[in-house]
Image (cartoon, helix red, strand yellow):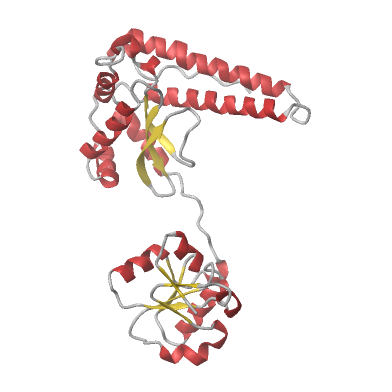
Amino acid sequence: MRYQLAPIFCRPWTLNGLSQKLIESHYENNYGGALRRLNAISEKLESLDPTKTPAYVWNGLKRDELTALNSTLLHELYFASLGGDGRPTTLLADALARDFGSVDRWRDEFMALAKGLGGGSGWALLVYVPRDRRLVNQFGAEHGQAIAGGIPVLALDMYEHAYHIDFGANAAAYVDAFMRNIDWQSVEARYQDASKVEPPRPLVQKEFADVPGVGVEDVKAMLDAGKPVQIIDARPKHYYSRSNDLMEGAVWRDPERVQDWIGELSKSDPVVVFCVYGFHVGCRMAIALREAGYDASYMKGGHSAWKAIGGALKMHA
């Protein structure tokens, strides 16, 4: 595969405080060099037989390919981030306020991240994460670092080649100049595209699709707030007897003997029932309780998920 050069997105002569010479050198030498290196690596990989090439050679080339590919992608985004007046659009201002508290808070965080890379190397990125449907600032000390699944919408190159011609060692002044030149219209377009990307598909148990489930974070919030809720640990007896911990606030009840203990529950307060991992045992317990007239739901992820979030535990006999 041969990677194609992307024409420079911004108009270098229009930028405020960033010289045409700086941008041209950056584009031609650093972006162009990364692209040429990427194509050379790609050609080398295509010429090799992976079944006969030593693993260290193949892996080294793939590592170099990752670095070069990310370098080209981030440089293309960097040039596409420039050419504006530095004022966020209404849509982006609302998104930044939602995810960071305010536009000023985002700007302070982003600039602190960038200036902290001054004198070294790396990238400051604004990234949309489809899983969480939010924007985050990402620290990237190397071209190989990325948030898995994240979609960068704004990039600031903090390698010295990006600023030394104009600013020497004064990386902070370069960051200030970059912020004045952000093309927020382009950032908005990329943000809108990124927002359309669906998050990873969640776990779906089709046979229990109609059973209400509640996340462990929500259960913890209910307990922390002192809300009335009845927590039933319905892990199978053989599993419960081999463990030594119990969720704080829960009582264990044998899922094979529901009729022996169901009368202990109150129908005025909600019931949350869980098993080990949040699959069939907990779901079936929730169904049985609902059929008996209780406001019951199962805890997603079960006891294991509760432990994974660091939920409070106690020892049981």
Can residue 19 be seen at all in this image of the molecule? no
Residue at the spot 50% in from the left edge and 80% down from the top edge: 317
Residue at the spot 55% in from the left edge and 15% down from the top edge: 36
104 is higher (above) or lower (below) than 284:
above
Q: Position of residue 283 (x, y in %)?
A: 52, 74
Q: Position of residue 226 (x, y in %)?
A: 28, 73
**Quarter occupied by residue 240:** bottom right
Give the number of callouts.
0
Q: Position of residue 180 (x, y in %)?
A: 24, 23
130 is higher (above) or lower (below) than 145:
below
Q: Residue furthest top?
A: 21
263 is higher (above) or lower (below) than 245:
below
Q: Nearer the viewer, residue 91 or 312?
A: 312
**Quarter occupied by residue 189:** top left
Q: Nearer the viewer, residue 160 or 28?
A: 160
**Quarter occupied by residue 239:** bottom right
9 is higher (above) or lower (below) than 216:
above
Residue at the spot 37% in from the left edge and 39% down from the top edge: 192
Q: Nearer the viewer, residue 55 or 77?
A: 55
Residue at the spot 62% in from the left edge and 28% down from the top edge: 62
Q: Position of residue 252 (x, y in %)?
A: 48, 80
Can residue 236 be seen at all in this image of the molecule? yes
Which quadrant, please, contains the N terminus?
top right
Q: Nearer the viewer, residue 153 or 192?
A: 153
